[in-house]
Image (cartoon, rainbow, N blue to C red):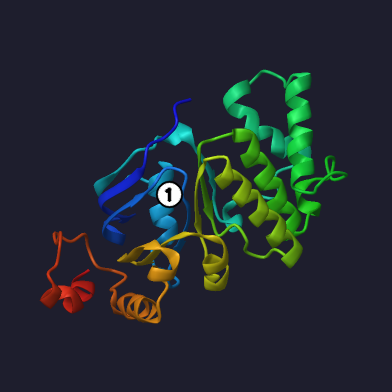
């Protein structure tokens, strides 16, 4: 599998049923970045991530530098069906799908890799437990173990720490840091600004449009956070797809209302 280049968004507009959730976003993540995407509720963060993952087709613009087969994608935990009757070991084994296909059974070596991934996230002893018996933190650990086996150069995570306890948070942050140290590009949608400042060198601040992108300390200023809140409050949820590409400074305040 070839390594990805830098991931670039070029004038990206994306949403649902001609109602854009993000507008005219242009930015670049460098190969090997450990990056956070933050912003107010409803800012379009998950929509942006789905476009990068290849799960959602942009309305306009494009994503370059990565293809879907290079991505390990973790959606919000609320989007994952925990009622499906599989065990922890079976769920984690699904990370080998790109190697096994539909019908092949795991080899001894692959079963060992499954066990190693389970142990790496602290779930040894839970292999035969079904998903509906797990706590939120245990379930998220199992999903991280599955991501490990996908062995993708790009890892995309949508609110990966929602509903987890402090110990699980610390353990999973260590997993992210190991991925980063191995040269993977890791991009996570997060709400905890303090965690972002402590862990993530690069941050994208979004409020339906790009507010700021770059080194975390330069992005997460009080002025930028205030601007993001004001932009988000101004957006019309029912606005149609617009034709504006690059508003000038004089038009910026009305740009949000026209969207």
Which residue is at a point 56% across and 56% down the rendered structure image? 76
Which residue is at a point 58% across and 68% down the rendered structure image? 195
The quarter in which the C terminus is drawn is bottom left
115 on left or right of 227 = right
Which residue is at a point 23% across and 73% down the rendered structure image? 256
Question: Which element carries disc 1, helix, strand or loop?
Answer: helix
The number of callouts visible is: 1
Q: Is residue 82 visible?
A: yes
Q: Is residue 87 visible?
A: no
In the displayed structure, would residue 157 be above or below residue 151? below
Camera-nearest residue between 160 and 20: 160
Residue 42 position, x and y percent, is 42, 69
Q: What crowding class fits label 1: few (fewer than 14 Cα within 10 Å), some (14-19), or many (20 or more)?
A: many
**Mark 1 — residue?**
50
Residue 254 position, x and y percent, is 17, 77
Which residue is at a point 70% across and 60% down the rendered structure image? 170
139 on left or right of 79 = right
Residue 219 position, x and y percent, is 38, 69
97 on left or right of 223 = right
Camera-nearest residue between 20 and 111: 111
Residue 257 position, x and y percent, is 22, 76
Q: Quadrant of residue 229?
A: bottom left
Camera-nearest residue between 182 and 246: 182
Camera-nearest residue between 212 and 102: 212
């Amino acid at each position: 599998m070839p390594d990805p280049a830098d991931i670039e968004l070029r004038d990206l507009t994306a949403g649902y049923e001609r109602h854009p959730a993000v507008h005219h976003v242009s930015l670049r993540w460098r190969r090997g970045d450990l990056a956070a995407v933050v912003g107010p509720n409803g800012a379009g963060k998950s929509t942006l991530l789905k476009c990068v993952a290849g799960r959602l087709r942009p309305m306009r613009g494009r994503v370059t530098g990565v293809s879907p087969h290079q991505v390990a994608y973790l959606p919000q935990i609320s989007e994952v069906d925990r009622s499906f009757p599989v065990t922890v070991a079976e769920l984690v084994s699904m990370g080998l799908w790109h190697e096994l296909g539909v019908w092949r059974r795991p080899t001894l070596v692959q079963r060992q890799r499954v066990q190693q991934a389970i142990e790496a996230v602290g779930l040894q002893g839970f292999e035969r437990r079904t998903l509906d018996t797990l706590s939120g933190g245990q379930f998220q650990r199992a999903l991280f173990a599955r991501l490990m086996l996908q062995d993708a150069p790009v890892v995309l995570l949508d609110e990966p720490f929602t509903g987890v306890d402090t110990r699980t948070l610390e353990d999973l942050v260590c997993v992210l840091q190991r991925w980063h140290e191995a040269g993977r590009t890791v991009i996570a949608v997060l709400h905890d600004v303090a965690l972002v400042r402590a862990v993530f060198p690069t941050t994208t601040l979004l409020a339906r449009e790009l507010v700021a992108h770059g080194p975390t300390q330069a992005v997460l200023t009080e002025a930028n956070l205030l601007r993001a809140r004001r932009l988000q409050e101004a957006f019309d949820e029912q606005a149609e797809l617009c034709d504006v590409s690059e508003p000038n400074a004089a038009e910026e305040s009305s740009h949000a209302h026209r969207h």
